[in-house]
Amino acid sequence: MVTKNRGLGRGLSALMADIQEPETPETNSDRPRRADLSVPIEQVQPNPEQPRRVFTPEALSELSASIREKGVIQPLIVRPNPNGSEGYQIVAGERRWRASQMAQLHEIPVIIREFDDTEVLEVAIIENIQRADLNPIEEATGYRQLMDRFGHTQDKLAEAMGKSRPHVANLMRLLSLPDDVQDMLRDGDLTAGHARALIGNDQASNLAKDIVSRGLSVRAVEKLVKSQAQPKAPARPRASEKDADTKALEGDLSAAIGMPVVIDHDAENGTGKVSVQYNDLAQLDDLIQILNSGR
């Protein structure tokens, strides 16, 4: 079920300012936020819907050592336990909570906010996107979650997150790659530049393995992909095979989106397909925005 779109307005902008992650390690932050209070660490519970499931042990150990020496400089964002029991549930800062446990702290500083379940999930996703150590697939997945769960558009996401629309669009295209290629990108074997060159290529998996084994540069991959035989465009039916209505509809659609449109219609069974030709990624971005605007 898609949550009703509440927009990325002033409220969420303030929320995002609340959940800005400090620099790593913890001691690098020059302006710590003031906590509402310090609470026993055992009274703070993680959010079971936290979308980030992997916490790197090495990074936690580094943060724990910093916290052991300097304390928790940036307080956690929490809300009162939604089940009515005593204590608090983490909205943002589970990594600091885990590192504080490793550092054997008895109390941690918190900022208390009254968030509903929808806002908590939204904050958790946004917090993860803002982390510096996310790989491109994790970041793209975060954008996809925000769009699917909350109805946000690429334009609004880019504006709120301080990113360009092409940045958001290009990352989300990576999710169309085969799973094994996404795994290579997630593991750092491929860069986003390598992966973008493979989008839409039916040999993406084999090419990705070749890239890794040969250590090819992004430029070399782009040349390799370009040198491959381009897939043949679907044959256009002869003009005599199309009725006037179909040709008129092709013209209307082409004019509406600013790109050539071909309609292949089978009058016998009523099926067919619509082909749109774009010349570059910018045009593809425009087409995606046109399609998304009707959601």
Image (cartoon, rainbow, N blue to C red):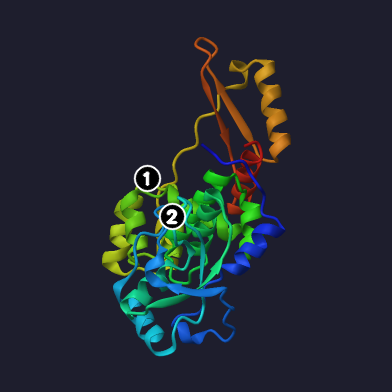
Q: Nearer the viewer, residue 248 or 187?
A: 187
Determine which residue is flagged by label 1: 202
The residue at 66%/27% (across/down) is 250
Q: Position of residue 273 (x, y in %)?
A: 53, 26
How far separated are the C-alphas under marks 2 and 1?
A: 53 Å
Three-letter code for the amino acid on which mark 2 is drawn: Ser
Label drawn at residue 85: 2
Considering only order in the chain, which callout, 1 or 2, is on the residue closer to the N terminus? 2
Q: Amino acid at mark 1?
A: Asp
**Above or below: residue 15 compared with residue 203:** below
Across and down, in percent, residue 190 comes to 36, 64
Can residue 187 be seen in this snapshot?
yes
Relative image position of residue 187 (x, y in whole percent): 32, 64
Side (left or right) of 210 relative to 8: left
Is disc 2 placed on a helix, strand or loop?
Answer: loop
Residue at the extreme top of the image, as rendered:
268
Badge 1 crowding class, 10 Å Cα cut-off, few under 14, some 14 to 19, many 20 or more, is: few
User: Exactly how many numbered labels are in the figure?
Assistant: 2
In this view, which residue lies farthest toward the left? 213
